[in-house]
Amino acid sequence: MRIFLLQRYTAVALLVFLTIHMVVVHYPPGEIHFSNIADRLENPLWKAIDIAFLFAVLIHALTGAYMVLTDVERFDRFKRALAGIAVIAGVLLFIYGTQTILAF
Amino acid sequence: MTNKKITVRIQRFNPDTDQKPYLQDFEVELAQGMTILDALHLIKEDLDGSVTFRRSCRHAICGSCAMNVNGQNMLVCETPLREKIDKNGQITIRPLPYLPIIKDLVVDRSSFWAQYQRVKPWLIPPDNVPEKEFRMSAEEVAALNDAEHCIMCGACYSACQVIALNKQYIGPHALLKAFLRVLDPRDADPRARLDDLDKGDGVYRCHTIFNCIDACPKGLNPTKAIETLRKLAMKRQAFEAARKERQKTLDKPVN
Amino acid sequence: MYKSTGFISFVLRRFTGVALVLYLFMHIWVIGGANSGAETFNDRMEFLGSPLFRIAEIGLLAAVIYHAFDGIRLLIVHYFDVTEYRKSLFYAAFVVSVILTIAGGLPILLHALEG
């Protein structure tokens, strides 16, 4: 089942990405400002990592939300509609988030 | 010397007269070697003939008397009453959870059997049925992990919170049976079985809660079976090819 | 209600999962302030700089850590035959999550109290 596999693979990817994210962005003391993020994102490798991170987290979150809803029999009937909403939301959020990463 | 008195609390529900289930207390004298089922019989015969429950063989093999005792699913016929008395001298017996109650301790198991039918619990024999007998190796038998010991009591099914949310889920009992048939080298169509299990209501709806293992009175392991089926579903093409190869030598002895 | 460690882990996993999805949407919106320039970004970040949100961040940290270790636990169950250690595995994941949450949450708390 593709959804389950997508979730497993992104879960493993997120373990790596989140560790990086926590250690690099949130561990150093001090306030986060536009400028210190922009400094880090000067490097195109960081941009690539952040875009991959965004991609993985969106897939994991939306497949997870889809699974939580379709586990309930009442919503299981609307699974096609839910999948459609998840795909559209995923694409829109990915475009918006990628713009953000490139804006720095 | 008089025997110790204990309180048996039974969840009662008569759909004709009751709005919702309630607990009723019965006083029972604890006798040597008494099982919970003995206590239920005693109550039905001496105290209240309207108490309704299912039971048959009293030897933990028919799977009729699975109930929820002090919050855990078990077969009441094989469980000593003494073991389940809590510190207040009480024991609480309820019907299997998450299933529609028909009366008192009797639940409607139609979804349980419908899912059992769905996985085609029978063996699909290969075309080249050997003249004498099928030969399985010791490893092949061991890999089945005692799954054939399942007595279809429903303890695992009604302990599963995914079943509580969604009756379309195949359920641990039927997935364990599917595991038994998929891994059986005599079965001719593991591919079709795995294709069905690979759907949204199949193996991926299991969320590894482990209640089925805790509940099983036969000590079986549906969770492990489901994890195995997940792995097989991912490589079902190769698995089907290996099965075809294996079935060519089903009539030969294995060393 | 059939209670067990597995049920507790399931409820916690679902609860933290849904919370994190909602947080993710907010996170994308806040950081997305950069789409309309550094000003908007810093404004939205400042909105989150209040002590109340600082303390809420500890809850967020706890949710992320628990969800991650629960996931690791499930991966272990999938790839190794360890169903008989199911209770110990849950307790291990829970205890590790609590320790890491305290370790990570204490600095956040102290920082929030300093103002």
Image (cartoon, rainbow, N blue to C red):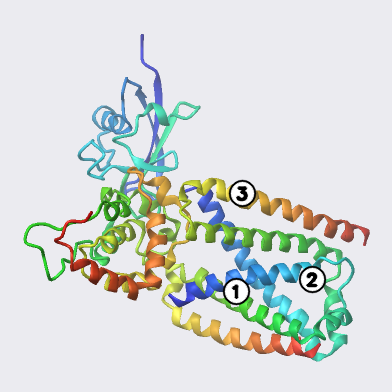
Could you say which disc has been placed on residue A61 in the image? 1
Residue type highlighted by circle 1:
Ala
Element under disc 3: helix
- Please tell me which residue lies in front, A31 or C11: A31
The first of marks 2 and 1 along the sequence is 2
Can residue C4 be seen at all in this image of the molecule?
no
Question: Residue B247: in sight, yes or no?
Answer: yes
The residue under label 3 is: C92
Q: In the rendered structure, the residue with mark 1 lies on which chain?
A: A
CA gap, disc 1 to disc 3?
25 Å
Chain under disc 3: C
- Residue extending furthest front? B255
Quote the CA–CA distance across marks 2 and 3.
Answer: 26 Å
Residue drawn at (12%, 69%) of the image: B128
Amino acid tagged 2: Val
Position of the C terminus of chain C by quadrant: bottom right
Q: Which residue is mark 2?
A: A24
Residue projecting furthest to the right: C114
Badge 1 vs badge 3, beta-carbon distance below 8 Å? no
Chain under disc 2: A
Q: Amino acid at mark 3?
A: Ala
Residue lying at 45% horizontally and 52% vertically, measured from the top left: B210
Nearer-the-camera pick, C16 or A41: A41
Give percent across and percent down for residue A63. Answer: 54, 75
Q: Are marks 1 and 3 on the same chain?
A: no
Q: In this image, A51 relative to B213: left or right?
A: right
